[in-house]
């Protein structure tokens, strides 16, 4: 029975990955690649043989007990005065969290590439060091807007940059001792989408050549913390045509990322940013990001602010770009363990260290992202049984994992 279940899950996984036309780079011999894993507990007597079991099904009785426990935890609310303080000083509490725990609290998220193969699509893998601009300026020498290849002379002019900025661009591809860059040295293909991207850049002339202008694939992680996603991504991105932006509203967390020995400014730009602040700007223009990573971040934001945050993030995506999401699900073990008096409102709580957390349903996630104009690609409830084999304790974990795409 267990064997048939694993074969079925694996078959669904393969079909799903083919449909996305993405390459899954990480495979485990003990755990066949499948959405949300494929280790099924069919024999309860074997529960302590592994640290984690996937696709755990709850009985109606378990669901009801969890609902009652969460309701009990939510009866006593934090005072309105305290709620205002937690909202106003949110970044300070997270800054204190990272000062206390440094980079030791969370493990590196090496699972990212298994669940989100979109982070490393075929097109950005090893290109033998070849340079290729992601957004190619439209030169006056081009006779049409159709896809074409062309040589570039030093005298060429870019429509969406000043002459000084154009010379900066050309200096990367034209030798100072040469009057012309020929096709074998630097082959430029200008597509209709790239021309539109160039036009978008023209609206952001104050940014000029922004960090990460050159690479053809850009990832933006919101809420990078101490870099537990950053460094696994950078390790895989070293020999690719990719660039990673990452931000956090904790200055100390960003300092931890930048001071890490694996931080590489050639492939990464870490900066302090509050996604709830509408006036806070980004170091890149709208419609310049391929993938936004939103992992255990949205839950720390006040529920009333979530829809607008996602709408603003969606504007950063290129047409066809995607937001990859993972966060806490309703009735996760950590919610049921919260003490009375920690509830801010509904399923929104404050922890003992002042940081906040919300527990989602997949219906809430669908409403937030679809309302932002994004198309649902995946929206799953990840129910797992986490096992402490030494203490013989089994804990029910629930997360929501989703993928939402901007219309091409």
Image (cartoon, rainbow, N blue to C red):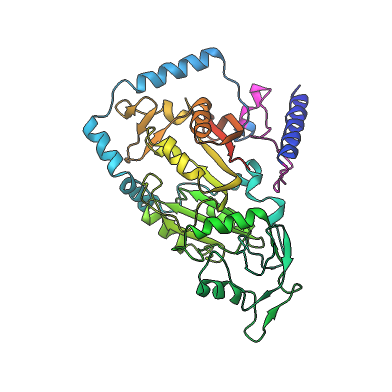
| Picture quadrant where residue 276 is located | top left
Residues 4 and 239: in front is 239
User: Would residue 388 be seen by someone viewing this image from the given angle?
Assistant: no
**Outermost residue, left side:** 81
* Image location (x, y in percent) of residue 398: 53, 29
Magenta span of residues: 21-48
Q: Toward which corner of the image does residue 46 lie, by quadrant? A: top right
Name the side, left or right, on which 133 lies relative to 392: right
User: Taken as a whole, is the magenta stretch helix, strand or loop?
Assistant: loop
State the residue at coordinates (51%, 60%).
202
Q: Position of residue 388 (x, y in %)?
A: 54, 34
Residue 223, magenta (yes or no): no
Depth check: 196 or 38 in front? 196
Q: Looking at the image, which residue is at 66% across and 65% down?
A: 132
Q: Position of residue 362 (x, y in %)?
A: 53, 27
Where does the image place residue 63, in percent across and percent down from the top left?
Answer: 51, 17
Q: Which quadrant is home to the C terminus?
A: top right
Q: In the image, is residue 32 part of the stretch drawn in magenta?
A: yes
Q: Residue furthest top?
A: 61
Position of residue 7 relative to residue 26, above or below, is above
Of residues 265 and 155, the one drawn nearer to the viewer in this rendering: 155
Q: How many marks?
A: 0
The quadrant where residue 15 appears: top right
Viewer can see residue 341: yes
Say which residue appears at 75% left-offset and 36% top-offset: 14
225 lies left or right of 400: left
Q: Residue furthest bottom?
A: 177
Identify the residue shown where x is 55% and y is 53%. 288
């Amino acid at each position: 029975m267990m064997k048939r279940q694993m074969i079925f899950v694996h078959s669904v996984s393969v079909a799903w990955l083919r449909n996305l036309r993405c390459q899954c780079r990480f495979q485990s011999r003990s755990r066949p690649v499948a959405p949300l894993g494929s280790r099924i507990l069919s024999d309860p007597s074997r529960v302590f043989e592994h640290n984690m079991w996937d696709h755990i099904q709850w009985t109606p009785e378990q669901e009801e007990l969890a609902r009652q426990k969460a309701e009990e935890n939510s009866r006593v609310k934090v005072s309105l005065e305290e709620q205002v303080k937690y909202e106003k000083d949110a970044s300070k509490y997270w800054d204190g969290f990272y000062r206390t725990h440094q980079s030791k609290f969370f493990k590196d998220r090496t699972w990212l590439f298994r669940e989100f193969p979109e982070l490393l699509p075929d097109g950005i893998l090893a290109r033998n060091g070849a340079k290729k601009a992601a957004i190619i300026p439209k030169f006056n020498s081009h006779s049409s807007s159709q896809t074409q290849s062309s040589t570039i002379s030093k005298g060429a002019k870019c429509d969406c940059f000043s002459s000084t900025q154009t010379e900066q661009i050309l200096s990367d591809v034209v030798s100072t001792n040469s009057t012309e860059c020929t096709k074998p040295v630097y082959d430029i293909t200008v597509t209709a989408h790239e021309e539109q991207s160039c036009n978008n850049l023209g609206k952001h002339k104050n940014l000029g050549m922004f960090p990460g202008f050159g690479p053809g694939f850009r990832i933006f992680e919101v809420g990078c913390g101490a870099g537990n996603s950053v460094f696994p991504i950078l390790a895989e991105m070293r020999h690719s045509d990719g660039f990673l932006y990452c931000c956090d509203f904790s200055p100390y967390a960003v300092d931890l990322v930048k001071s890490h020995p694996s931080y590489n400014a050639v492939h990464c730009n870490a900066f302090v940013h509050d996604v709830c602040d509408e006036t806070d700007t980004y170091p890149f223009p709208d419609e310049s990001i391929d993938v936004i990573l939103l992992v255990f971040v949205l839950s720390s934001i006040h529920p009333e602010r979530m829809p607008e945050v996602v709408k603003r993030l969606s504007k950063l995506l290129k047409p066809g770009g995607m937001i990859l999401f993972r966060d806490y699900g309703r009735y996760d073990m950590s919610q049921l363990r919260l003490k009375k008096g920690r509830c801010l409102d509904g399923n929104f709580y404050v922890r003992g260290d002042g940081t906040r957390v919300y527990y989602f349903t997949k219906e809430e996630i669908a409403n937030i992202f679809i309302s932002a104009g994004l198309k649902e690609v995946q929206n799953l409830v990840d129910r797992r049984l986490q096992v402490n084999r030494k203490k013989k304790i089994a804990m029910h974990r629930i997360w929501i994992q989703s993928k939402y795409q901007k219309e091409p």
